[in-house]
């Protein structure tokens, strides 16, 4: 028969509450006797109870049932008899569960303030199976099989069902390592289970279910528990010791011993800051850990025009005290302040930066401000009028002087009757902190036209972390993100050994290929090409050994650029100040150098930060990276080597069946030999987790975990109307039958619908012309100036 019966009939859904309702198999049902090559027998001797149980378990797994330990008898502290039974032995007393549910229900009804008690629904497979194995003490620490009943009153699991038996499910060392490792890339247990299935070939080959994977990650969090702060500080201390004090970290606690502030910087970040630390972008990221602490990375731009992380911190609050401390720690680790620091409009940062970095420029991120325009002025107004297009030409134009900017700003606001708008006037009062015209003569290291480096880096880090991570898990995810970031840097550095194709016949372009990284060279190449084809000489005079050139740019009307060339040193300065702001010569300078037949870029125009291998050549910070801090890290490193070697073996014989069989036989032999060498073949769960984390919890908690923080930011917050409208960029333009324009709306929701004389209103209530011949633009911001150079949109993550 294929089904078990209950009291002689098939199980029914109708259960008498007063009955015992035991599951029992009818006597007429035939017995199931498994056939196994490893079947135990009476008189068989085992060296221990565990050895006997393992043998019986293998027999059960092979046949398709499970076993469990049952009763035992002891005499003088020695077990003299032990029983192992089928997992379906005995019965479940359902009546006791019913009484508990009835008691819970009555308690819920008697107390109106208590909600319904939810109990987990459980099932039982017990059906009075009599199969068992009995052991008796045989002396000399050995046990003999005294009784063995191999008849079962239930069918066995099929081949496709055996994988779900408890005896066939186990979190192997490979499974534990795999789930733990992929979690550092923000891959959850369920997705990890699916990925491992593809690697193993089938779900049955994994040896564990997705729920087992999930429970394993839960066990790691439970293991960390209240030792979270102690464990991450111990990890940092190990890193400092193995790096000869090159790894820097500091922390602070409150009066109750709870961690409140944590700052760290490794030697690679400090070396990068030594070369690229002229401009630093600083912003907070939220929902990166279970405590709600704010994650604040220090970001810059490397010589490949990519984001680079110098240091990072975790803070419990965004206030003056915390920012003061973290900036002091940054200055202590890096030894010198940045020339310019870019932040959002945080009032606490604005108050602290002049005190800690008195000689550093403080600038507000333009992207954070510009993206607020639609929400402050109205989405429809910004999208359907030409206001943003005209204002962007003034705001983003770094060739304007402060006077020219102020005139252009007022002109645009007066045109659209927005001169009295309070928020616009507030932003105008802050113009010296965010408008490029006021930084045109300051070194900005490529961040003058920033696309929010911090915002894109925050978006990048959020791909690796989760809000439920402990501090230990968060730092491992952070290390994974940094490793990917630096691997992308190494890849770009390797690409510098190849030479781009020149587009002109000038020798100075070929000289630029030898000095600049590929990304920067393409920017310089653009300037050289413009110097060859778009520049013309308006005037030239030589005074006191200095050649003064007035140059006309084809694409900049009504303006001349003055270039001064010192003939004795070939030192060049231009009124556009591109070299001062960014660090490479402008097209006007290249044109003047060409007039003087100079075929190589003067050394004073070669900025170190844009050169090939700039960190290796110019960094003055000395130190070594953190070595292997623990036996676990050495084990993991060796495991990777073994895995690489194994893949190499497979690759050598991948297309030869006989060679594959030979390799398989060799691996089986090595597996047997390796098993004999292992001193602790079955470590406990806590030992495995401690090895994975690389640090063990101390017996006494010295630093308690952070208290739950409630900060202002959240990456899961409700989106504003302007942010929701960004989704419209993904939609296809359509022809509106009302306004006759290609827009993201149609005649049903056209802003002109119902308005007379083809007029719409601006935020001040004034009418604007909606002539169909004027196309308008949806937040028409120059892609090159406000989005990433690779045109991947905002925010763009480094290395993605």
Image (spheres, helix red, strand yellow):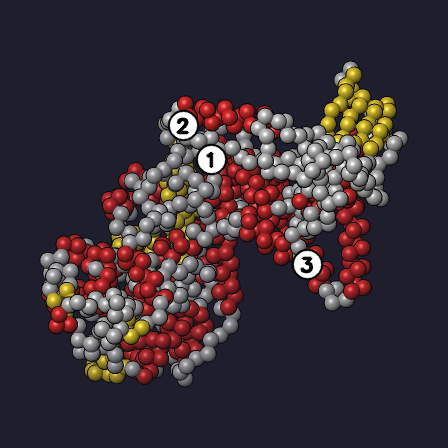
Determine the residue positioned at 32% across, 83% down: 533
Name the residue rendered at 36%, 76% in the picture. 526
Q: State which quarter of the image contains the N terminus.
A: top right
Residue 759 visible:
yes
**Can residue 53 be seen in this snapshot?**
no
Measured from the top left, where is residue 95 in percent x and y? 60, 26
Q: Percent position (x, y) of residue 399?
A: 23, 69
Q: Residues within 10 Å of mark 2 (few under 14, many from 20)?
A: few
Tag 2 residue: 114
Work out whether residue 1 or residue 217 is closer to the camera in this orientation and state it: 1
Number of numbered discs: 3
Instruction: Work out whether 128 lies above or below 323.
Output: above
Label 2 to label 3: alpha-carbon separation: 59 Å
Residue located beneath label 3 in the image: 647
Mark 3 crowdedness (10 Å alpha carbons): few <14, some 14-19, many ≥20: few
Q: Residue at x 37, y 64 (%)?
A: 793
Q: Is residue 590 above or below residue 437?
A: below
Farthest residue, direction right: 43
Out of 443 and 151, give the one closest to the viewer. 151
Which SS class for mark 1? helix
Find the distance from the CA under tag 2 to the CA under tag 1: 36 Å
Q: Secondary structure at mark 2?
A: loop
The residue at the far top in this view is 76
Can you tell which mark lies on residue 229?
Answer: 1
């Amino acid at each position: 028969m294929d089904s078990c019966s209950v009291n002689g009939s098939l199980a029914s859904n109708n259960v008498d509450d007063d009955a015992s309702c035991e599951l029992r198999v009818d006597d007429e049902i035939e017995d199931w006797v498994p056939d196994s090559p490893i079947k135990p027998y009476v008189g068989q001797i085992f060296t221990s109870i565990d050895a006997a149980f393992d043998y019986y378990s293998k027999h059960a797994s092979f046949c398709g049932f499970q076993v469990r330990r049952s009763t035992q008898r002891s005499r003088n502290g020695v077990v003299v008899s032990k029983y192992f039974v089928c997992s379906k032995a005995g019965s479940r007393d359902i009546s006791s569960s019913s009484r508990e549910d009835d008691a819970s229900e009555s308690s819920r009804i008697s107390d109106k303030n208590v909600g319904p008690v939810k109990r987990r629904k459980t099932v039982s497979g017990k059906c009075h199976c009599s199969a068992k194995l009995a052991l008796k003490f045989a002396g000399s620490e050995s046990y003999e099989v005294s009784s063995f009943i191999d008849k079962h009153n239930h069918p066995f699991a099929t081949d496709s069902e055996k994988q779900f038996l408890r005896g066939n499910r186990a979190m192997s060392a490979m499974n534990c390592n795999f789930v733990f490792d992929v979690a550092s890339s923000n891959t959850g247990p369920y997705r990890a289970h699916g990925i491992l299935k593809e690697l193993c070939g089938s779900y049955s080959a994994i040896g564990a279910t997705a729920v087992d994977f999930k429970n394993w990650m839960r066990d790691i969090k439970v293991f960390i528990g209240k030792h979270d702060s102690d464990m991450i500080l111990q990890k940092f201390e190990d890193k400092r010791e193995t790096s000869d004090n090159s790894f820097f970290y500091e922390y602070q606690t409150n009066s109750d011993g709870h961690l409140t502030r944590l700052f760290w910087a490794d030697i690679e970040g400090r070396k990068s800051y030594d070369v690229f630390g002229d401009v630093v972008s600083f912003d907070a990221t939220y929902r990166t850990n279970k405590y709600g602490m704010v994650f604040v990375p220090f970001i810059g731009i490397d010589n490949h025009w990519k984001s680079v992380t110098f240091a990072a911190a975790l803070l419990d609050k965004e206030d003056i005290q915390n920012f003061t401390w973290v900036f002091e720690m940054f200055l202590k680790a890096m030894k010198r302040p940045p020339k310019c620091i870019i932040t959002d409009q945080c009032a606490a940062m604005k108050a602290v930066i002049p005190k800690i970095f008195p000689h550093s420029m403080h600038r507000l991120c333009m992207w954070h401000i510009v993206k607020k325009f639609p929400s402050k002025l109205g989405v429809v107004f910004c999208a359907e009028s030409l206001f943003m297009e005209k204002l962007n030409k003034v705001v983003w134009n770094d060739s304007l002087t402060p006077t020219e900017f102020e005139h252009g700003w007022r002109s645009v606001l007066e045109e659209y009757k927005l001169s009295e708008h309070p928020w616009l006037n507030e932003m105008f009062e802050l113009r010296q902190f965010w408008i490029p015209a006021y930084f045109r003569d300051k070194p900005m290291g490529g961040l003058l036209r920033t696309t929010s480096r911090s915002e894109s880096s925050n978006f990048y880090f959020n791909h690796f972390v989760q809000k439920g991570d402990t501090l230990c898990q968060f730092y491992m995810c952070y290390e994974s993100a940094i490793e990917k970031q630096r691997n992308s840097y190494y890849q770009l550095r390797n690409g510098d050994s190849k030479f781009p194709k020149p587009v002109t016949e000038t020798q100075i372009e070929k000289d630029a290929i030898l000095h600049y990284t590929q990304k920067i060279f393409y920017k310089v190449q653009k300037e050289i090409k413009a110097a060859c084809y778009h520049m013309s000489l308006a005037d030239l005079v030589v005074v006191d050994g200095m050649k003064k050139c007035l140059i006309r740019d084809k694409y900049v009307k009504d303006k001349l650029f003055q270039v001064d060339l010192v003939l004795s040193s070939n030192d060049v300065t231009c009124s556009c100040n591109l070299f001062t702001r960014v660090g490479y010569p402008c097209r006007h300078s290249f044109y003047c150098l060409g007039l003087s037949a100079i075929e190589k870029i003067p050394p004073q125009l070669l900025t170190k930060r844009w050169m090939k291998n700039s960190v290796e050549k110019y960094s003055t910070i000395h130190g070594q990276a953190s070595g292997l801090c623990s036996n676990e890290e050495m084990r993991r490193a060796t495991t990777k080597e073994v895995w690489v070697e194994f893949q190499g073996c497979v690759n050598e014989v991948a297309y030869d069946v006989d060679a594959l069989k030979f390799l398989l036989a060799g691996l089986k032999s090595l597996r047997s030999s390796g098993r004999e060498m292992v001193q602790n073949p079955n470590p406990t769960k806590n030992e495995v987790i401690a090895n994975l984390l690389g640090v063990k919890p101390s017996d006494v908690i010295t630093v308690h975990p952070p208290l739950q923080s409630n900060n202002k930011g959240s990456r899961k917050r409700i989106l504003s109307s302007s942010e929701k409208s960004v989704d419209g960029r993904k939609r296809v333009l359509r022809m509106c039958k009302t306004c006759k324009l290609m827009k993201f709306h149609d005649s049903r929701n056209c802003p002109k619908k119902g308005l007379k004389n083809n007029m719409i209103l601006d935020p001040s209530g004034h009418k604007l012309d909606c002539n169909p011949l004027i196309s308008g633009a949806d937040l028409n911001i120059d892609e090159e100036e406000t989005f990433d150079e690779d045109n991947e949109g905002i925010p763009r993550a480094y290395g993605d």
